[in-house]
Image: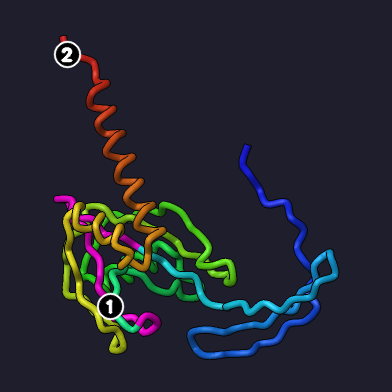
Amino acid sequence: MPLLPTLTAPTILSEEIIYDSPWLRVRRVDTQFASGLVRPFSLKEEPDVAVCLPVTPDGRFVLVEEYRHGPRRALFELPAGVVDPGEDPLAAAAREALEETGYQGAIRHLGSTWISAYSGARKHIFLMEDAQRVGEPQPEPHELMRVVVATREEFEEVVRSGELSDLDAALLCLRRLQDGAQERTRTSTELPAST
């Protein structure tokens, strides 16, 4: 039986937009809890994003190193971007992987998660297998980035280092790859001997 949330939501007393830009809107929401406590929350309104980890046929991981203004330094990331209005998240993942890395391949949706507890946006996580380089990266003019192709050991070290912004997506992709490898091993060892 799945575990489902059962808590009753607090009452919303008022809402107002306190910041608005083309990329982000922040809404102040005043809420009242059952205890009578009234508290304001600042909630982000932002679009969904699609994140995709390309893996080449020889098992190399394709990521990007990109300068990020929040920490004021470069971080490793999985290719990712906004899901445009009306766009299928899988199409967004394929588009972003191609634009940021120049790779295409077979894409599979692994799951979706909330971007944060203070946003209604979702992060859609994809794994691209048999990724092939088909062109040059085409980053946006405001993106300072480079493509990094890493071995599994190098990628796992990046994950452990804390220098990867898409940790949830990376761990889900690694788990799926591990499960797939175990399944292939189990299937090959369970084949009946030929007579």
**Residue found 22% across the figure and 63% down from its top:** 62
Reading the image, the residue beneath label 1 is 74
Q: Compare residues 66 and 181 and report the one nearer the observer.
A: 66
In the picture as drawn, the residue positioned furthest to the top comes out as 195
Picture coordinates of residue 131 (x, y %)? 21, 58
**Residue found 66% across the figure and 48% down from its top:** 4
Q: Quadrant of the C terminus?
A: top left
Callout 2: SS:
loop
Q: Compare residues 110 and 169 and report the one nearer the observer.
A: 169
Picture coordinates of residue 146 (x, y %)? 20, 76
> Which span is picked out in magenta?
52-71
**Residue found 29% across the figure and 84% down from its top:** 143
Picture coordinates of residue 144 (x, y %)? 26, 83
Picture coordinates of residue 159 (x, y %)? 30, 59
Residue type, mark 1 in image: Ala
Q: Compare residues 101 and 73 and report the one nearer the observer.
A: 73
| 68 part of magenta stretch | yes
Residue 163 vertical position relative to residue 73 in the rendered view, above or below: above
Residue type, mark 2 in image: Ser
| 124 part of magenta stretch | no
Reading the image, the residue beneath label 2 is 194
Which numbered circle lies on residue 112? none
Earlier-in-chain disc, 2 versus 1: 1
- How far is mark 2 from mark 1, CA to CA? 55 Å
Task: Please give left or right for residue 75 compared with residue 3 in the image.
Answer: left
Q: Quadrant of residue 99?
A: bottom left
